[in-house]
Image: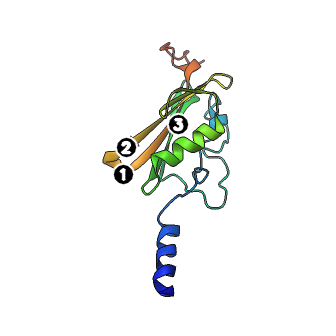
């Protein structure tokens, strides 16, 4: 009986995040910075956090304007949403999907990428999405 109980505990511990604070987040501090600057795409990873399997950075006019992080299963959408709600309480404008962090100038969108077996978090600096062309290089 003890062997079965130990196996069940081991199963649950390695099955994936059980707390919302176990996801390593994209570093929103890079938004608006020049791509020539040496910057970290992710915040420092805490023990037990799941790191993303893919990180994308979108660039416009030589500046970082957006970024996405993908977390493979067994990371759950509910864990990611709970963590964002904890970090950005009061900014949720569409429950469980969109947060507008106006004081920092970005929006967060969360999606369940079922075809990729992943959860995606996208951070978009909305002051760079005006559609204007980049200035000509000197």
Q: Badge 1: how crowded within 10 Å, few (<14), some, or many (20+)?
A: some
Q: Is residue 104 above or below residue 121?
A: above
Q: Which residue is located at x 49 percent, y 68 percent? A: 12
Q: Measuring from the top left, give residue 101's x and y in whole percent.
A: 62, 26
Q: Which residue is located at x 58 percent, y 18 percent? A: 127
Give the colouring mode of the picture. rainbow
The answer for how far apart the CA atoms under marks 2 and 1 are is 6 Å
Which sits in the foreground, 124 or 22? Answer: 22
Q: Secondary structure at mark 3?
A: strand
Q: Measuring from the top left, give residue 31's x and y in whole percent.
A: 62, 31
The answer for how far apart the CA atoms under marks 1 and 3 are is 19 Å
Q: Which residue is located at x 65 percent, y 54 percent? A: 45
Marks 2 and 1 in Cβ contact (< 8 Å): yes
Q: Nearer the viewer, mark 1 or mark 3?
A: 1
Q: Is residue 38 above or below residue 137?
A: below
Q: Which residue is mark 2?
A: 113
Q: Which residue is mark 3?
A: 67
N-terminal of the pair, mark 2 or mark 3, is 3
């Amino acid at each position: 009986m003890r062997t079965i109980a130990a196996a069940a505990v081991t199963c649950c511990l390695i099955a994936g995040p059980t707390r919302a604070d176990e996801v390593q987040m994209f570093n929103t501090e890079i938004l608006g910075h020049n791509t020539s600057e040496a910057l970290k795409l992710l915040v420092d990873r805490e023990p037990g956090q799941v790191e993303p399997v893919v990180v994308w950075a979108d660039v416009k006019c030589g500046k970082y304007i957006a970024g996405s992080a993908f977390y493979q299963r067994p990371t759950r959408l509910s864990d990611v949403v709970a963590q964002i709600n904890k970090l950005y309480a009061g900014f949720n404008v569409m429950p469980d999907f969109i947060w507008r962090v106006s004081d920092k100038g970005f929006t967060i969108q969360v999606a369940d990428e079922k075809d990729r077996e992943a959860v995606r978090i996208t951070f978009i600096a909305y002051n760079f999405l005006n559609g204007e062309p980049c200035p000509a290089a000197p």
